[in-house]
Image (cartoon, rainbow, N blue to C red):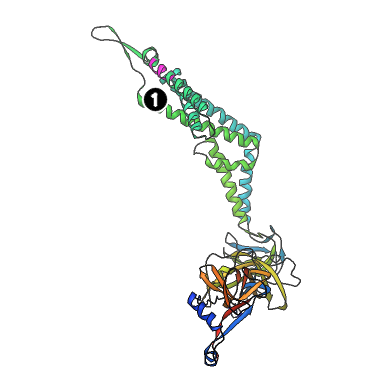
Amino acid sequence: MQKTFLQKISVKTIFITFVTVSAIITTVVLFARPTTSEAAATPALQTAKVRTGDLIVTASGAGTVVPSAQVGLGFRANGMVAEVNVMLGQQVKAGDTLAYLNDAAEQIAFSQAEANLKALFSPAGIAEYQIGMVNAQDAYDTAVFNLQYYISPDVYYWETKTSEARHALDILELDPNATELVVADAQKVLGRAEYSMKAAQIDYINVYAPTYFTYTWIDEITLEEMAEVVPPSPSEVTLARATLEQTRLALTDAQRALEIVQNGDSAMLAQSLSAADGTALANIKAIYLAYENSRLALEGTRLVAPFDGSVIALDVVKGQTVGTLPVMTIATTDHLLVRFYLDETDLDKVAVGNQVTFMFDAYQNQPVDGEVVVVEPTLQVVDGTPVIVVWASLPTEPGFSLMSGMTVDAEVIAGESLKTLIVPVQALRELAPGSYAVFIVDANGQLVMTPVTVGLRDFANAEIVSGVKAGDVVSTGTVETK
């Protein structure tokens, strides 16, 4: 900061000791006609009239003009600069290519990845995923048939119905809008499904297993025909269930993969990122990631303007070998802000939305009004002093040319009251925290304590909202005389 910081008078409240009842009596006695010796020793009473005026509470600071957006740009890859398309001070638009590296290798990789991506949506690509869908459906159907054979079609059917009914009931029980009747009906559906499943399990033991899993053989000694029911083992059933779940997921992936390539919308490719390895969707995922990586690598060889602005720093030329450090800086020029500092004692006087008056060193007699837009949540230390950091807007057309870096004095309007009743702060007597009174001098010269409502205050004056009227004479204390 080029100016001496905090060239202002901090607003401080001057408190006067509250006059007790005994002091009031003493003061009234003093107003009686004194003797000559008493008059010489009696302090003179200071008074002031309640007047109408304007009271404005402010806080002053200093700062500089800064751009609302500024960014240093660097390449995302190492290489040799092939072209620089801008000069220092040049205006640029968002999306403009400012410079680029030699990108022959990146172009080849991107072209190949782009071709692979387009092949997904070709008739041949669609046919490939249609075949994958058919194979996944066949594997799923086979897994269903095998599980049904192991546990019986009836048990499989009622297991499925019971699972569906339980899921539906869980959803209803979490729904605050579901009525008791609807929940009760769902519970009945689940109960019937569970009853039917138990019946099917009993039928499996008594009928299905003996029919499909009875094995016979001839005893070598007695030559009698022997028979025994040997149903599938628990491990065989568990494996069949796991195979069914695996084929179910594979079928879902195959359906999604076919939907993506048939739709032809490359934006849907991001759905493939959740694919499990070895599925049809995983193939799309690999092609999509290869395309995205090559695209980002190619973009990394270019510097593109992120917003409209001006080139305020340029440290790169054609043919230069560069890394990833910033080589130029772009800043906005049509939307400037003021960043200024206030003493920490002024924290109660600054808030977002407060009006600010700016005076620029370059334009001494042309004040400009702005508005506080940000008050940083932490203090900073400037020249060893803790300060509040404030950001404020400027008018779009201030009437003169502004440049980033210009120094400025700022005056925040914390509050203002126009054509209001005002008394010196010395007239206030604090009765309790936030409660005040004044002593009005009546026509007989007597002091009358009167409660008042205080509004705005600065270091010298206070706004009186109620309790007095214009022209009233109030005591501001006494002064010793000789």
| Location of residue 481 (image quadrant) | bottom right
Magenta segment, prevailing SS (helix, strand or loop) = helix
| Location of residue 133 (image quadrant) | top right
44 or 147, which is in the foreground? 44
Dot 1 alpha-carbon crowd within 10 angstroms: few under 14, some 14 to 19, many 20 or more: some
Image mark count: 1
Let me know if residue 182 appears in the view.
Answer: yes
Task: Specify whether 394 is left or right of 272.
Answer: right
Taking the spot 58% from the left edge, 78% from the top edge, the residue there is 446
479 or 293, which is in the foreground? 479
Let me know if residue 20 appears in the view.
Answer: no
Q: Farthest residue in the left direction?
A: 221
The quarter in which the C terminus is drawn is bottom right
- Whether 180 is among the magenta residues is no
Percent position (x, y) of residue 159?
A: 45, 23
Task: Specify whether 259 is left or right of 24.
Answer: right
The quarter in which the N terminus is drawn is bottom right
Percent position (x, y) of residue 225?
A: 30, 7
Q: Which residues are magenta?
A: 196-202
The residue wearing badge 1 is: 237
Task: Specify whether 397 is left or right of 348.
Answer: right
Percent position (x, y) of residue 394?
A: 69, 67
Q: Is residue 444 above or below residue 170?
A: below
Q: Secondary structure at mark 1?
A: helix
Q: Is residue 59 above or below residue 215?
A: below
264 or 375, which is in the foreground? 375
Q: Which three-letter amino acid code belongs to the residue tagged 1?
A: Val
455 or 58, which is in the foreground? 455
Taking the spot 57% from the left edge, 50% from the top edge, the residue there is 293
